[in-house]
Amino acid sequence: MIRVENLHFAYNGREVLRGIDLVFGEEILALVGPNGSGKTTLAKHLNGLLKPTRGRVLVDGMDTREHTVAELSRKVGYVFQNPEHMFFEETVFKEVAFGPKNLGLDDSEVEERVRWTLGAVGLEGFEERTPYSLSGGEKQRLAIACVLAMRPKYLILDEPTTGLDWKAERSVVETIKSLREDGHGILLITHDMDLVLELAERVVLLENGKKAFDGPVEEFFSLDLERHGLEMPELLVLAEKLGAGFVRSVEELAGRVRQ
Ligand SMILES: Nc1ncnc2c1ncn2[C@@H]1O[C@H](COP(=O)(O)OP(=O)(O)OP(=O)(O)O)[C@@H](O)[C@H]1O
């Protein structure tokens, strides 16, 4: 469980998180909100990259102020936006092996872990490719693999599908679903309301450094999203026009309409 208690944070005296309470566990939690509302700043507190100005963050009971980012990274993996900037090895295998090697695992353990991780993100067979030759979706999945190789319980994914075409986006979405099935807690930072509708179990909306909403996905989509500067997914607009209520996929909508 990650527990955020009365979190305040200021950059150079300017407060951008203003008293946030949050409990996050084994779930897909979408963190949404306008540009500059504090999403990335909040997420960076969850693996200790930033430390609270006031309040505290506990990761499975560990106070982030008392632990290094290296220690916390074993619990909370952070996949940054535009992950290609983080690749520096000449092969996919070496890229994924880097973290486990640094943990001091021996060669056979490292190899086993790399194979397992590449399987988990659907990149088996890519071991000898150079990271820069991968497609956008493959790069995103490699970035997830590099973090996953540390076996963290929680994953933070910052705009994991931005800039991807449909097929690549699907591959990342399927990876996220399978990570959830494997028992990971996933914090998804996104501006894409379709993605929120498809994946999230719970949504936290940040506005101006404060929580404006925290609740189940269905309740989130019953808000007047336009008032919050957010766009309602077309699927839900259509469902409403058809009187079908809340649905999360085209198949679900079709099923309701046929009844
Ligand atoms: N390193 C920094 N130094 C000073 N101010 C910063 C820094 N990083 C972010 N900020 C400011 O903190 C506020 C919150 O930024 P943050 O990146 O957390 O928002 P966000 O919700 O993730 O935005 P976006 O949707 O644009 O990614 C913004 O006003 C931003 O300008």
Image (tube, helix red, strand yellow):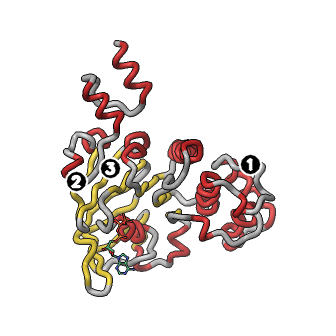
Q: Secondary structure at mark 1?
A: loop
* Element at label 3: strand
Please report the residue visible at 42 percent of the width from the left and 48 percent of the height from the top: 27
For the N terminus, the image quarter is: bottom left
* Residue at mark 2: 228
Q: Residue at x 28, y 23 (%)?
A: 244
Instruction: Return the residue nearer the eye: 29 or 195.
Output: 195
Mark 3 vs mark 1: which is more N-terminal? 1
Residue at mark 1:
124
- Label placed on residue 203: 3
Query: Farthest residue in the top direction?
Result: 259
- Amino acid bearing label 1: Glu
| Picture layout, residue 150 above or below residue 172 | below
Would you place residue 179 above or below residue 65 in this image?
A: above
- Mark 2: amino acid: His
Mark toward the start of the polypeptide (1 vs 2): 1
**Does residue 127 lie above or below 59 as drawn?**
above
Q: How many marks?
A: 3
